[in-house]
Image (cartoon, rainbow, N blue to C red):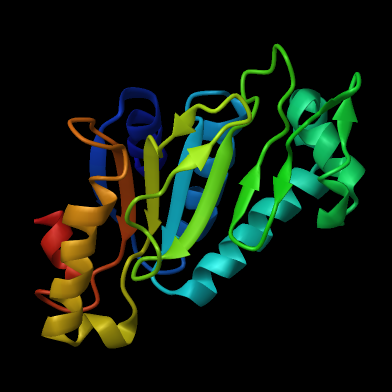
């Protein structure tokens, strides 16, 4: 049921909050959905958000592992994944990587991944950025090598609250404000962004409880 909701958001631009118990794989689903949305070319800029900056860092590390060490992804999407494998985990190799003499513009930084620019690739130049929900969310923008400005078209929020924030009325309201303001506005003026939020209710009236109401 949750996977169907995630797919509906990715494919049709819908906005969902989906309740899940703890330990049922919310984080894994969010990360795999991010990879799927990027590699299939359905979204050129995905913003993966977590409750805290630490969780966001861990999410990006996992995404990098999927792209650099998963042989099945390499087999299915070589145009995107093979250049990642050639980095061998060394971000300094990004600047010099070329495909038939042209720079691939691949990016491998502390808060985002930019897939290689390869002619004919469905995910050429696609971006995934991670952040804590209360981090640098507003105004996310990426400038492509051709000068085109790209904004996120999909936001995936992996359980937007912590045990501590769920108990604080002020923190609940702050996080709700970020979602309703900064996150829903990521796509730019008068544009709707696809959003999916797998979440767990910790107590009545917390952030997840309000999003699911």
Residue drawn at (78%, 34%), measured in percent from left and top? 81
Along the viewing direction, whichever of 122 and 200 lies nearer the viewer: 122
Residue drawn at (48%, 37%), measured in percent from left and top? 45
- In terms of image quadrants, where is residue 82? top right
Query: Which percent across, then down, holds residue 209?
Result: 15, 66
Total tally of numbered discs in the picture:
0
The quadrant of the picture occupied by the C terminus is: bottom left
Q: Is residue 196 left or right of residue 81?
A: left
Residue drawn at (74%, 21%), measured in percent from left and top? 118
Q: Is residue 171 left or right of residue 50?
A: left
Residue 208 shows in this picture: no
**Residue found at the far top of this picture:** 120
Query: Which percent across, then down, holds residue 132?
Result: 42, 68
Along the viewing direction, whichever of 142 and 195 lies nearer the viewer: 142
In the rendered view, tell whether residue 111 sits above or below residue 175. above
In the rendered view, tell whether residue 99 sits above or below residue 34. above
**Residue found at the far front of this picture:** 147
């Amino acid at each position: 049921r949750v996977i169907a909701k995630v797919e509906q958001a990715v494919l049709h631009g819908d906005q969902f909050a989906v309740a899940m118990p703890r330990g049922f794989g919310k984080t894994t689903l969010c990360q795999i959905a991010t990879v799927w949305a990027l590699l299939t070319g359905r979204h050129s800029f995905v913003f993966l958000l977590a409750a805290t900056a630490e969780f966001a860092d861990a999410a990006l590390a996992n995404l990098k592992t999927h792209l650099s060490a998963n042989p099945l992804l390499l087999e299915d999407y070589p145009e995107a994944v093979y250049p990642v494998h050639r980095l061998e985990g060394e971000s300094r190799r990004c600047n010099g990587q070329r495909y038939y003499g042209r720079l691939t513009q691949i990016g491998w930084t502390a808060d985002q991944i930019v897939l290689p620019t390869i002619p004919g690739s469905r995910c050429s130049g696609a971006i995934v950025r991670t952040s804590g929900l209360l981090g640098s969310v507003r105004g996310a923008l990426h400038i492509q090598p051709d000068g085109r400005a790209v904004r996120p078209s999909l936001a995936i929020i992996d359980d937007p609250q912590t045990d501590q924030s769920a108990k604080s009325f002020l923190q609940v309201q702050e996080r709700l404000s970020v979602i309703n303001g900064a996150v829903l506005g990521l796509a730019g003026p008068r544009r709707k962004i696809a959003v999916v939020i797998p979440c767990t209710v910790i107590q009545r009236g917390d952030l997840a409880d309000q999003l699911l109401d």
